Image (cartoon, grey):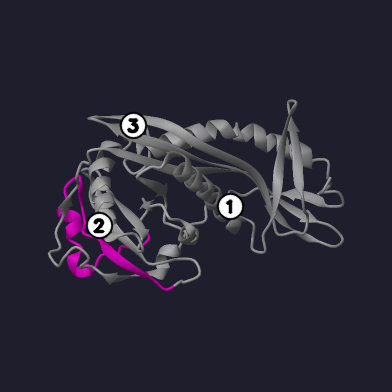
Amino acid sequence: MVLEGYDISFHRWEYQRQEDFLEESLEIADIDIEGDLWSPISGYEPSKLKVSFVDGVQRIHQFVYLSSDKDRGEGIFVSMGAGAVILIKEGSSFRSQYAVSEKERLFITNTNIKGSIDVEWAGYKMSFRIVNSPKEPMNNVLNELKKLEYVVVKKVSENFSPDFVIWDGTLKYNLRETSFPVVGAVKKHMKYFIPREMADILKDMEVGHRTPLILLKSFDTERAFDRYTWYVKIDEGGIASTVRFEVPADIDKEKVVDIANTTAWLYPMITSMEFTDKRSPHNVAPLRYIEKTLSRELGNPFLLKRAIEVELSKFKG
């Protein structure tokens, strides 16, 4: 057992989700990509469409302190999953398919232990792969989830050849390696990328409208890259009822315009309803389906937490 020789004690406080601050490294470089007439642009219905949505979920089960004669630190037991839905437009209707699913169970720790930790519950054995993190383990949870989501992005792109992939959240540096169009959909606005003197466009837009394209320059060359971005009004709410989309700036501009027009047409039709999802309208139906499916596949978090506690109770702390 890899924990042999360690004393274990439990964290009892609540996990706080780590936010992604990559947006802070981006600045507006050009707002005249589609001409200098800055006004809302209506979405456009394509004659055919195959688009994939990718999202992931994480379940933090237990925090622990680990202490031995030679080593001490902390760790987190976490289950995570990533999935993809394919949405295909057929005439005036849509057909959807749950296409790809990947799951992992991890123990992220800043100690020196290696291998995996097995946990058994009701005759079922679960193996948590150990991931060593030089930082606080909590800060590495989101990175591991994004790695798993990227595996799904690549698989759904290679196996299903969608017109483009919509990946929930801001895009990551590893997209430099890809040749297929991936669109980031940012629901929570950490920073607005519209000049102050033109910000009224967000109030003037009607549902199904978008802003013109904006070129963003990155000053974090290790983790980010230049990109095009635009905002889409997805329901009748105020400025907050917008989603910001982004794509790498090395994609052909005409292709980006087509994608932007399609997102402005598509997103208002697939928003979630307030009575079914407290994160409506931003948590659109395909993403909500992915999250519900993955949550079910990962198992009951309370039973998993209890199984881990029973396993770790073998070690003094």
Across and down, in percent, residue 249 comes to: 35, 63
Tell me the amino acid under the disc marked 3: Phe
Tell me the amino acid under the disc marked 1: Glu
Left of 110 or right of it: where is 4? right
Residue at the (21%, 59%) spot, across then down? 212
Measure how far apart labels 1 and 2 are at the Cα level. Answer: 34 Å
Which of discs 2 and 3 lies nearer the camera? The answer is: 2
Measure how far apart labels 3 and 1 are at the Cα level. Answer: 32 Å
For the residue labelled by badge 1, is the local secondary structure a helix, a strand or a loop? Answer: helix
Residue 200 within the magenta-colored segment of the rendering: yes
Name the residue beneath numbered marker 3.
275
Q: Is residue 16 visible?
A: no
Left of 162 or right of it: where is 129? right
Residue at the (17%, 59%) spot, across then down? 201
Give residue 227's quadrant in the image. bottom left
Which tag, 3 or 1, sits closer to the chain's start?
1
Mark 2 packing: few (<14 Cα in 10 Å), some, or many (20+)? few
Name the residue beneath numbered marker 2.
254
Out of 14 and 302, give the one closest to the viewer: 302
Tell me the amino acid under the disc marked 2: Glu
Residue 172 within the magenta-colored segment of the rendering: no
Residue at the (86%, 49%) spot, across then down? 4
Mark 1 packing: few (<14 Cα in 10 Å), some, or many (20+)? some
Magenta residues span: 190-219
- Badges 1 and 2: C-beta atoms under 8 Å apart? no
Across and down, in percent, residue 248 comes to: 37, 60
For the residue labelled by badge 2, is the local secondary structure a helix, a strand or a loop? Answer: helix
